[in-house]
Image (cartoon, helix red, strand yellow):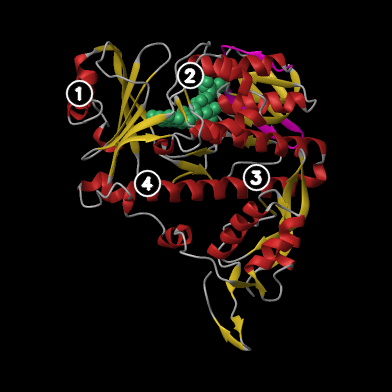
Amino acid sequence: MTTDVCVAGGGPAGATVARRLALLGHRVCLVERAPFPRAHVGESLPPSIIPILDATGMRDRVEAAGFLRPDRALIRWGARGGAVRSDANQPGFQVDRDRFDALLLDAARESGVSVLQPTAVVRVAAGPGGCTALLRDRSVVRARFFVDATGRAGVLPRARRRTAPATAALYAYWTAAPLEGSETRVEAGESAWYWGAPLPAGTFNATVFVEARRCRGLTAPARDELYRDLLARSTLLASCLRGRLLGPVRVCDASPFVDEQPVTATTLKTGEAALAIDPLSSQGVQVAMAGAMKAAAVAHTIVHLPNRVDVARRFYSEGIAEASSRHATLSFEAYASAGRGGHGTFWSERTGTGDPEHLTLRRRIAGLPRRVVLSPLARLEPAPMLEGQLIQDGIALRHPRLERAVAFLGGVPIEPLLSAAARPIDSDDLVTRWARHTVPPLGWHILRWLCERGVLESAPTIVDGSAQSGRG
Ligand SMILES: Cc1cc2nc3c(=O)[nH]c(=O)nc-3n(C[C@H](O)[C@H](O)[C@H](O)COP(=O)(O)OP(=O)(O)OC[C@H]3O[C@@H](n4cnc5c(N)ncnc54)[C@H](O)[C@@H]3O)c2cc1C
């Protein structure tokens, strides 16, 4: 087969990137190893996935699919205990991944993607003119561009770096367990953390996240014993043991990592093939889908405009690196907030490896400066950016405390925002000036963001002709 783009993997990332590219007019062939429906971990989708379902045009289908819609979670984590209501005023989803992933893949098919399933990509030969993918059934797909969306399996050569200690997930499905309610359950244990949730099919997934070394080389009975022992120590999930186990106890890798070579002139990695975040956030699926939308723009730019290959590659690599660093920081903070730093290596390793500078950056300041001025360290420079479906050159802010160039804040180009603060200006006046670009509530958020990162600095306040520094 000859096509424009060949995508390997039909999970959330592969289905999303393939559909997007087909809608942009490319001939797309997607190769999926497993026959669908197929089971998969990653069943809890928080409300923050909704904007991504909107952006990918999948919201109506997902809402109509009859998945569970819990609007709160039961949490035992540090000082936080009890039930926590969703902070987004709308519930998330608890999905069976077999149905959820099939729904996304069907949408890709309807948009014109040719799906070859079940067969796997076993090898990819990339040359200057494109790629040749050899499939398990010995057929060959030739394409101008190849996308690796095979999740943790990965089919392209890896350049992965672990961003947190190696973690394994021990999990099993239960039925008839005396657990009431549709809430997700999350708990910090002595040497592990726990996640559990009822699923639309009437089963309950109980997962224990432990240090990977504890699971290495275990026989099936030993794995079963370890799982049951850990489950018995949980407050929120122990009653699973009074239910009936469906199938074996399984183990899978849950370590976060980033691939440091996510894109070349003819290939790209997306979803968990490029970036795996800590499952603690329950945001893997949304990160995979949002990343796949960017991946589609990058592939589209490279295929259409060969003179923009470098700018597109920089955009993509920097985006993956920045997302990895942001999620690593968030996970570090979440583990630290459990307050179990002294409780054995599971917790000390996960709370002792974070970058303290990130933490300081993220700490909220009590009040904003009354008067601000642009930091002399802030520079506006040419940088690659996503505009519409293409990557272009634009103007972006660079600052020593920013991990990557920033071209837009809250959808507003950064240049006019910053030029208004080239001289000291009252914060109120600045936000008023920004009103021609954005609404004031967002303006205050932008101001806070810039101040927290030192892009805007506190400037002396003028009171009766004398200068004073002050916070509003
Ligand atoms: C224990 C655990 C719990 C998690 N919990 C959550 C959660 O609650 N919420 C959440 O949002 N995320 C969660 N995640 C993360 C989530 O599962 C992933 O982020 C998400 O599935 C990534 O999507 P993907 O499309 O990149 O990869 P996948 O979903 O893994 O899809 C990859 C696809 O590629 C196919 N494939 C593999 N190799 C080949 C090949 N050679 N050729 C062709 N096809 C191939 C596979 O069959 C598969 O269908 C969890 C992860 C773990 C490990």
Looking at the image, is 389 positioned above or below residue 373? above
Tell me the SS state at disc 2: helix
Q: Residue at x 71, y 41 (%)?
A: 265
Per the rendered image, the range of residues in magenta is 112-130
Rendered residue at 54%/19% (across/down):
101
Q: Is residue 367 above or below residue 14?
A: below
Q: Secondary structure at mark 3?
A: helix
* Amino acid, disc 1: Arg
- Expressed as whole percent of the image width and height from the top left, the position of residue 30 reads 65, 20
Which tag, 1 or 3, sits closer to the chain's start?
A: 1
Please identify the quadrant where the N terminus is shown.
Answer: top right
Mark 1 or 3: the one toward you: 1
Q: Tell me if residue 192 comes above or below residue 231 in the rendering.
A: below
Whichever of labels 3 and 2 marks the residue nearer the N terminus, that label is 2
Mark 2: which amino acid?
Answer: Arg
Residue under label 1: 228
Instruction: Name the residue carrying label 4.
Output: 334
First in sequence: mark 1 vs mark 4: 1
Q: Give the spatial CA distance, label 1 vs label 4.
A: 26 Å
Query: What residue did someone put label 2 on?
Result: 97
Q: Distance from label 1 to label 2 (Cα)? A: 24 Å
Task: Estimate the x, y position of residue 134 in percent, counting from the top left.
Answer: 62, 21
* Magenta highlight on residue 146: no
Tell me the residue that label 3 is attached to. 316
